[in-house]
Image: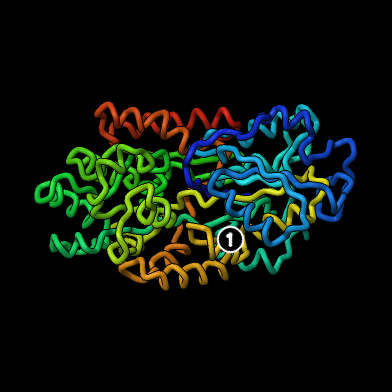
Amino acid sequence: MARFRRASYVRSLLTITGSVGVLALALAGCGGGSDDSATTGSYGFPQATQDDKATITVWVDADRTKAADAFKKANPDVPIEVVTYDGSANGSNSFRTKMQLFDRAGSGWPDVVFSSQNNDAAWASQKSNGKQAFAAVLSDGLVAQDTLDQFTKGALNPCTVEGKVYCLRNDLAQVVLFYNKALLDKFGYQVPKTWQEYQALGEKVAQEHPGYIIGTVGDAFAPEIYFWSSKCQANDVTGPKAVTVNTGSPECQRVASMLDVLVKNGTTPNISVFTPEFVKKYSGMVLMAPGPAWYSGAIFNNPESLKVPAGQLGVAAPLAWAGEEAVTGNVGGGTWFVSSHSKNLKAAESFVRFATTADEYQVEVAPGYPAYAPAGAKWVKKQEESKYYATDLQAVVEAGTAIWSGWGSGIFSQEAIWAKTMTPGIASGKSLVSLLPEWQTAIKNQAQVDGYTVK
């Protein structure tokens, strides 16, 4: 039985660029072929007539345009057209919606798509309205098995449906504890190792250094940072159409209770880290923050965000609940898909393999810890050699294999559900504990809409 795994990536919302919209691209037939011309090929899915010289159309979000640029430089003879879209950020579901339009039109599918969401394999691997699945099977020979085997253990779980791999992970987004070593030393605080110590420190900070913060809950991926890391059974996808949801469990209750204390005392505000308000109010005031590995480049070492000076940012292991082994959530990481409709599978495969494994992008340019293990080791070495961090990055490496397996990758977006239910509730002053039943109901309802049996 399939076992999907949940995750989601950098959340900047962008729109389709250029003078033509996606529908116009569909009418223009950008790179895809219709099912009428498809013949069953050697990779286990119906294939259009192949043309090694056909232009491939690649959809990326703004941050992944750098991957396309690096590919073009390394492969100048491969014809490629790049289209920028929102990457399905924050659970917008734009990837799926647009592919459904192309299914109805019978043409227009892009050859390669990047998604910031790691639950897209759940739908992209399935037939839609009688049409063949959008995602090409990668593990039946399209991508070499040796390449697949070198991804970090568990990294391809969100891409694997009933034993077949349908996408490649861009990077791992394991949660670690970032902290400002200079501030901790100044205040005489120790780096917490458990969530209980983390809460106690937050209560002390609120009294002794009001205005400083130790985290935030204002983003739609907050449940992946806190609740996933607490083994909260809010998203236990156990099969293609089965999910167990129990937000009343002790594992959910304990993290909600902790956050209620920290939200109330101001050390964990309900504000998005991607807003100008956050940067203006909390630059120089972030004592620590649990968050995904990509926070380092997106938030802390970013001239447009917090701009933490070199030598101050420390990275510690994921927090554990007392008496338990530490586990982590996975906040995105992103996925690359090859279209089963592509007329140039050779070039499309070359692109996704390059984007996920090549040093030119993953080591030299990418801000997050690569899912491809050989690139990950080189990325860590490069980051440490930069002398930016106050500590080594072994915590990032170790956290990459500590992602809890009880949080699945269903079709429905946990981020979208959280944003519609929990975020407004927290903003109105309600406690997270009191909102847990509402969250459970919202998950259950959305899962059932998507055809899941909910336990």
Is disc 1 surrounded by few (<14), some (14 to 19) or many (20+) residues within 10 Å? many
Q: Residue at x 60, y 64 (%)?
A: 360
Residue 36 to residue 227: above or below: above
User: Label 1 sits on what residue type?
Assistant: Tyr
For residue 322, side relative to residue 1 (left or right): left
Relative to the observer, which residue lies in front, 83 or 91? 83
Q: Tell me if I can see residue 133 in this picture.
A: yes
SS state under label 1:
helix
Q: Position of residue 450 (x, y in %)?
A: 59, 31
Q: Tell me if I can see residue 3 in this picture.
A: no
Relative to the observer, which residue lies in front, 405 or 339? 339
How many labels sit on residues? 1
Q: Residue at x 76, y 37 (%)?
A: 30
Q: Position of residue 176 (x, y in %)?
A: 37, 59
In which quadrant of the rendered view does residue 327 lie?
bottom left
Q: Residue at x 30, y 37 (%)?
A: 277
Q: Residue at x 47, y 40 (%)?
A: 12
**Colouring used for the render:** rainbow
Residue 393 to residue 14: above or below: below
Residue 113 to residue 75: above or below: above
Relative to the observer, which residue lies in front, 265 or 239? 265
Q: Position of residue 244 (x, y in %)?
A: 49, 41
Q: Position of residue 353 (x, y in %)?
A: 67, 59
For residue 41, side relative to residue 303 (left or right): right
Residue under label 1, please give it. Answer: 361
Q: Residue furthest left?
A: 208
